[in-house]
Amino acid sequence: MMDFFYRCSECGKQFDITPDRMVCPSCSGKQKSDEPLRGILEVGIEGRLKKDWDTFDLLPVGKKYFPPIPVGNTPLWEPKNLRKETGFERLYIKDDSLNPTASLKDRASYLVAAFALREKIDDITVASTGNAASSMAGVGAAGGLNIRIFIPASAPEAKRVQALQYGAEVTEVDGNYDMAYDLSLEYTKQHGSLSRNTAYNPLTIEGKKTAALEIFRQLCKIVGGTVGKTVGKTAGGAPDYVFVPAGDGVILGGMYKGFEDLLQMGLMDRVPTLYAVQAAGSNAISYAFREGSFRPDYSSNTVADSIAVDIPRNGYHALKYLKKYDGRCVEVTDSEILSAQRRLASTSGLFAEPAASSALAGFLKTKDEIPSDSKVVLLITGNGLKDIGAALRGLSEKNP
Ligand SMILES: *Cc1c(COP(=O)(O)O)cnc(C)c1O
């Protein structure tokens, strides 16, 4: 049996995992309005993993509570043409656009929905720029939950329509994500609904770690390591480099958490080098990694709407991991993102949204600093059909 608890990422204080516990009460007291969240909670784990483990064994909610919808277990592609063109024979693509609502966000929604069902909570509220909203709406629908969404009116139409099709209550906010965020928290306070706001609800970080656990298991199968015991430095399921698109830094934090769990369980002997890929026009984490602190009053601007953030909610937590495991940041321009989008689609048959395509753009930009025999994984986080406007723009840049 495994034991799970919350642990503050700043002061280390521990708490039970309960619906009213979101951030550390003492560290969140230091919160300023224009900085990332303080007092982010991580899920701590105690216990020994059984030999024939699966990803549910490392999650703090029992398997029986998860809604009947096939989240995760997405394929790891071996992109032959891209391998040839780049000279990286061990390049892989983790295709999370193949989740039920077509983005990686489903991993977080899945765990939050399971937690709500276990705690007999019927209502979940989320503020989102798009994918978290459509994801929570879809996964919530499968769980029979009522989902309320606060979304900026500027969100791509497909993501809003998705949420409406799944039956969510959608409130369009005439303002940016920060306004939607504040309105959603006010609503959860008044109505006792569970918040799925990214980073604020610790289970959003924890849910996303399953992508890292799956990459490990899939590479073990391909490379021939053993899933159930310690593998050597160069063999087995540990990738060498993973390219992760980053906006709020929750996917990045979640990926690190997953690899750290595997390290703690003795299944891996090191954490891979993660590249946080950001748009040049939305580079808050990369800037803080370089300069030592976050900028107040920053305003993002990029075609990759899913990684466009002014204040990265999980900024401090993501930065802590980047420093601890010697991670790297890379910034890519909108034109590099749109070019990578076309290249991924035309060489591999994978049509990814701009934020997801940034993983390839970041790899193409930095590949000369990486040994070409490395195991490299590109994390593709969302489907291209979610933002046709951006994809059209990419085509006209190619043939102006
Ligand atoms: C949310 C999202 C991201 C970025 O995740 P963060 O946790 O905000 O860093 C990247 N790609 C897609 C498709 C997303 O929906």
Image: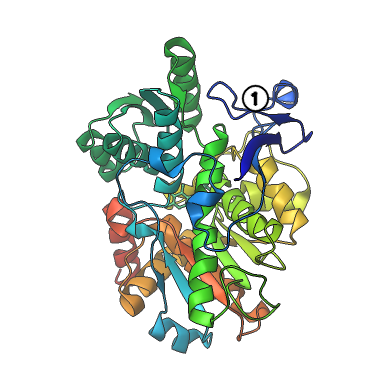
Left or right of 374: which side holds 116?
Answer: left
Query: Residue reaching furthest top?
Result: 190
Instruction: In this rendered view, identify the residue nearer to me: 360 or 56.
Output: 56
Instruction: In this rendered view, identify the residue nearer to me: 196 or 380.
Output: 196
- Residue at label 1? 33
Measuring 36% from the left and 62% from the top, which residue is drawn there? 352
Left or right of 367: which side holds 398?
Answer: left
Q: How many marks?
A: 1
Q: Position of residue 172 (x, y in %)?
A: 33, 26
Q: Is residue 174 visible?
A: no
Q: Is residue 400 above or below residue 8?
A: below
Mark 1 sits near ligand 1, with its Cβ under 8 Å away: no
From the image, which quarter does the C terminus lie in? bottom left
Q: Position of residue 302 (x, y in %)?
A: 47, 50
Q: Quadrant of residue 76?
A: bottom left
Q: Position of residue 78 (x, y in %)?
A: 42, 79
Left or right of 268: which side holds 351?
Answer: left
Measuring 74% from the left and 59% from the top, which residue is drawn there? 325
Q: Position of residue 99 (x, y in %)?
A: 34, 54
Instruction: In this rendered view, identify the residue nearer to me: 18 or 378.
Output: 18
Q: Is residue 33 above or below residue 258?
A: above
